[in-house]
């Protein structure tokens, strides 16, 4: 009953059922011939589409084509062309075929068109900031320190902004693309580069062929002055395309790709399924990355030098996009309602790679953060993983589809075991559905065929229904018996769950594991024991996507830290140290935590010292030794503790940190010096101003702000081009503040920069920050009119509401 009440409430706001798209024709092949007008930011295209009626006879064809000029449409008969009548709206092209065709007929339609991505009404979401489809970056080459580029982003249905197609995930076809560019540029597309032809006008036409079918939203192209670094995996060519200054670091960034391909191929029992694999980094990308078939695109933050990679490696996002080549590209969701079949698997690949490459602690640490992020979203708006009612398809790209989807797969793996999960069920699922579209039942049936078990109970509660369990666990020992009471206490609108799980019980230093299956609201389990246990640990594998409340004594938690080896168990014990009644036990456990093999546990222990849970003096000697910790985040926190406690005593260590191997530590040291109103030597400031690392630059502008110094306009303007997203938001805030102290001519120079960002940057929070910057300059001539114009043309409802308040 609660389920139907929940759906009924949802349907009061969202009434449209989001069915998969009905297929009237079957698109077989797409041939594109494209060239570019950089000044107008237009693309001229000729699209030749081969198709056949899907089943029923057809006399017209409806294609997605957003914001284009359609010059002509014709039907091909060999080399002969016959014009066809057509009607075109803003986003749809309807072609009159002149007669009825049967499913035994194959037709070729040629469309001459002009794509104008900047001249149509745009949308976007938190996950994918813009749906422009085709992007010209620095088209007039006016922005200093920014390369000229063209790239595409098709998901969800934005590729139809640069070529006419059936822009739906349940369509797929082969592809060929002729890309004509200035000879100085490199091109990239799906499939393999067959040939390059030099033209007579300093241009070149590259011919890319994709002879395996894939969905239109996965078509891509990229154009730019890239360095191409070559690699290979089992005779499959790999390329890493980066800006020239990062060429020497490309293999530091992407170099684990061959090992990932080996690991995932062996894990699934299916080799990487495509002809090649390329990874390209572009400027101003509208998402983190995109898994286009054979060619993934990444945001510019991925470009890192060796020193930056000490603080942040990018294996998670690289593994995520690579795993999509199986889950999403080879086997594709039939509708956005089932997008977790793409994104849940890609999310889980991050855990799998961490587990294999960096160890169980690293995998559990990152996965625990993923779980908490899902909880944050679910607490506000619980939703089912598979959902056919939503406002826009972009709404499906949330922490349910990604994070919850990954955790549900993890629970399924734990339930059936590794062999049944990987080399049997997933292998069967991929083989049965290769080059096809799928829905959730295809996955369930593959697992049922392997295991022989009806798994509707699992798929219904985790995929089809919303929410997650909240478990209250209480244990007590009486009359030689351990009683374990478990209550599902989630709200009444959330159903009860069936939860196969284990419990670990330590008696006299020996651990015993017991299987438990929870199905009722409240259940009690009894375990006859010869003596009182030292520890009862519920769900020792930390595999449940559940909030678990289980009180334990200080002594039990201390025992747990020493004996339950998992990251989650150690972290739980360390987190609760602040509540211990025994000061000596606190001191003892924090001292152990400072030596824990995993950095995050060490950070938690440091946090307790910073919070005065224990006395600094008791651990000072150990803290000084930790200034050489292998982890940069630990070193930065230790430095903060020492300086906060006695800045004069540890002044030398603070200034030594300005030469640390980690940019994160250097940035932290600059910020500590700024906060304490101390000074960095002019020579060092000169060197730091040359850096392009975000941590250093943001800390440096904070340093200038704290000291009320204004270095120069051009430095700020140059550095701003290095940032995107959240970092650019904060940088503009600092820049705006500094401009209040700048000469009027420099403030006027900033107006043009800020107005361009406020009007056209793909990230709405950057537009907001630039708009606020303009408001600080509103005393200058013409700025009020600019603000009014930006407010009038803004399409993002979130920003319009903020602008009203401003």
Image (spheres, rainbow, N blue to C red):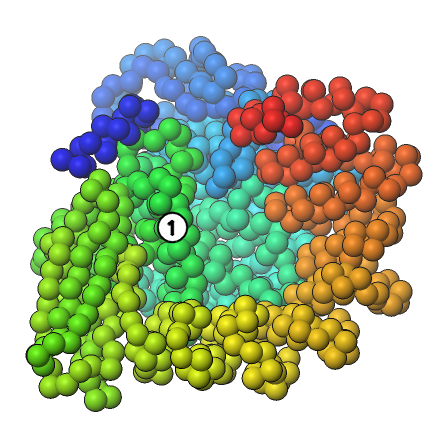
Q: Quadrant of the N terminus?
A: top left
Work out which residue is located at the far bottom of the displayed protein and give it.
Answer: 508
Residue 225 visible at all: no
Q: Which residue is mark 1?
A: 374
Residue 255 visible at all: yes
Q: Quadrant of the C terminus?
A: top right
Estimate how packed mark 1 is, as few (under 14), some (14 to 19) or many (20 or more) residues with alpha carbons within 10 Å.
many
Q: At 74% across and 79% down in the image, what residue appears?
A: 649
Q: Could you say which is closer to the camera, residue 32 or residue 638?
A: 638
Numbered-mark total = 1
In the rendered view, does 357 fall on the left or right side of 800?
left
Which quadrant of the figure has residue 510?
bottom left
User: Where does the image place residue 316, in percent across and percent down from the top left?
Assistant: 47, 60
Q: At 52% across and 76% down in the image, what residue appears?
A: 614
In the rendered view, does 108 fall on the left or right side of 119?
left
Which quadrant of the figure has residue 205?
top right
Q: Could you say which is closer to the camera, residue 460 or residue 421?
A: 460
Q: Is residue 109 shown above or below 326?
A: above
Q: Is residue 794 shown above or below 30?
A: above
Q: At 72% across and 65% down in the image, what residue appears?
A: 672
């Amino acid at each position: 009953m609660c389920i139907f009440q929940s759906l009924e409430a949802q349907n009061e706001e969202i009434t449209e059922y989001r069915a998969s798209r009905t297929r009237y024709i079957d698109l077989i092949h797409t041939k594109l011939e494209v060239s570019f007008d950089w000044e107008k930011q237009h693309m001229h295209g000729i699209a030749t589409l081969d198709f056949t009626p899907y089943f029923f006879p057809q006399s017209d064809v409806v294609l997605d084509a957003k914001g284009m000029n359609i010059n002509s449409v014709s039907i091909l008969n060999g080399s002969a062309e016959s014009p066809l009548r057509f009607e075109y709206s803003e986003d749809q092209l309807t072609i009159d075929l002149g007669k009825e065709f049967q499913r035994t007929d194959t037709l070729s339609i040629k469309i001459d068109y002009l794509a104008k991505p900047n001249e149509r009404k745009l949308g976007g979401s938190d996950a994918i900031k813009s749906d422009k489809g085709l992007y010209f970056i620095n088209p007039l080459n006016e922005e200093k320190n920014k390369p000229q580029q063209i790239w595409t982003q098709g998901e969800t249905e934005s590729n139809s902004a640069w070529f006419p197609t059936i822009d739906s995930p349940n369509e797929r076809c082969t592809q060929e693309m002729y890309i004509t560019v200035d000879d100085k540029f490199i091109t990239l597309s799906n499939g393999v580069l067959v040939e390059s032809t030099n033209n007579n006008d300093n241009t070149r036409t590259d011919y890319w062929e994709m002879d395996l079918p894939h969905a239109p939203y996965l078509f891509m192209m990229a154009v730019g002055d890239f360095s191409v670094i070559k690699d290979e995996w089992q005779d499959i060519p790999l390329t890493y395309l980066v800006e020239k200054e990062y060429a020497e670091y490309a293999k530091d960034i992407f170099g684990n790709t061959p090992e990932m391909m080996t690991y995932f191929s062996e894990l699934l029992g299916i080799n990487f399924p495509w002809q090649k694999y390329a990874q390209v980094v572009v400027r101003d990308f509208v998402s983190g990355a995109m898994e286009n078939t054979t060619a993934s695109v990444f945001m510019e933050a991925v470009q890192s030098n060796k020193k930056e990679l000490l603080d942040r490696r990018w294996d998670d996002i690289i593994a995520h996009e690579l795993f999509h080549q199986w889950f999403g590209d080879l086997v594709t969701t039939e509708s956005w309602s089932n997008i977790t079949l793409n994104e849940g698997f890609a999310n889980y690949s991050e855990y799998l790679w961490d587990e294999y490459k960096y160890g169980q602690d690293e995998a559990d640490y990152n996965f625990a953060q993923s779980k908490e992020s899902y909880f944050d979203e679910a607490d506000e708006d619980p939703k089912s993983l598979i959902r056919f009612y939503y406002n826009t398809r972009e709404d499906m790209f949330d922490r349910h589809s990604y994070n919850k989807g990954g955790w549900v797969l993890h629970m399924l793996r734990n339930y059936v075991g590794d062999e049944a999960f990987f080399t049997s069920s997933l292998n069967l699922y991929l083989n049965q559905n290769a080059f096809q579209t799928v829905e959730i039942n295809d996955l369930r049936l593959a697992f049922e065929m392997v295991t022989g078990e009806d798994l509707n109970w699992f798929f219904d509660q985790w995929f089809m229904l919303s929410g997650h369990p909240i478990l209250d666990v209480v244990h007590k020992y009486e009359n030689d018996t351990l009683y374990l009471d478990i209550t599902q206490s989630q709200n009444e609108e959330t159903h009860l769950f069936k939860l196969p799980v284990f419990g670990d019980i330590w008696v006299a230093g020996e651990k015993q594991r017991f299987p438990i299956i929870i199905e009722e609201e409240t259940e009690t389990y009894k375990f006859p024991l010869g003596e009182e246990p030292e520890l009862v640990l519920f769900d020792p594998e930390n595999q449940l996507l559940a909030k678990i409340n289980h009180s334990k004594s200080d002594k039990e938690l201390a025992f747990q830290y020493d004996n339950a080896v998992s990251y989650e168990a150690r972290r739980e014990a360390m987190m609760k140290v602040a509540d211990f009644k025994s000061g000596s036990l606190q001191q003892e456990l924090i001292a152990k935590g400072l030596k824990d093999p995993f950095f995050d546990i060490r950070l938690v222990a440091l946090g307790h010292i910073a919070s005065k849970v224990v006395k600094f003096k008791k651990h000072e000697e150990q803290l000084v030794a930790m200034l050489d910790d292998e982890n940069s985040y630990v070193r930065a926190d230790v430095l903060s503790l020492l300086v906060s406690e006695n800045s004069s005593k540890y002044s030398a260590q603070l200034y030594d940190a300005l030469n640390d191997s980690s940019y994160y530590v250097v940035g932290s040291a600059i910020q500590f010096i700024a906060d304490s109103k101390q000074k960095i030597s002019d020579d060092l400031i000169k060197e730091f101003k040359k850096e392009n690392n975000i941590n250093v630059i943001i800390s440096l502008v904070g340093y200038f702000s704290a000291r009320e110094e204004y270095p120069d306009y051009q430095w700020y303007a140059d550095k701003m081009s290095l940032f995107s997203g959240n970092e650019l938001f904060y940088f503009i805030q600092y820049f705006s503040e500094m401009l209040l102290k700048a000469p009027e001519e420099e403030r006027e120079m900033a107006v043009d920069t800020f107005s361009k960002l406020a009007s056209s940057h793909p990230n709405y929070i950057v537009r907001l920050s630039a708009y606020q910057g303009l408001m600080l300059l509103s005393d200058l001539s013409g700025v009020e009119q600019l603000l009014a114009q930006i407010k009038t043309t803004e399409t993002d409802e979130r920003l319009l509401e903020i602008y009203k308040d401003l």
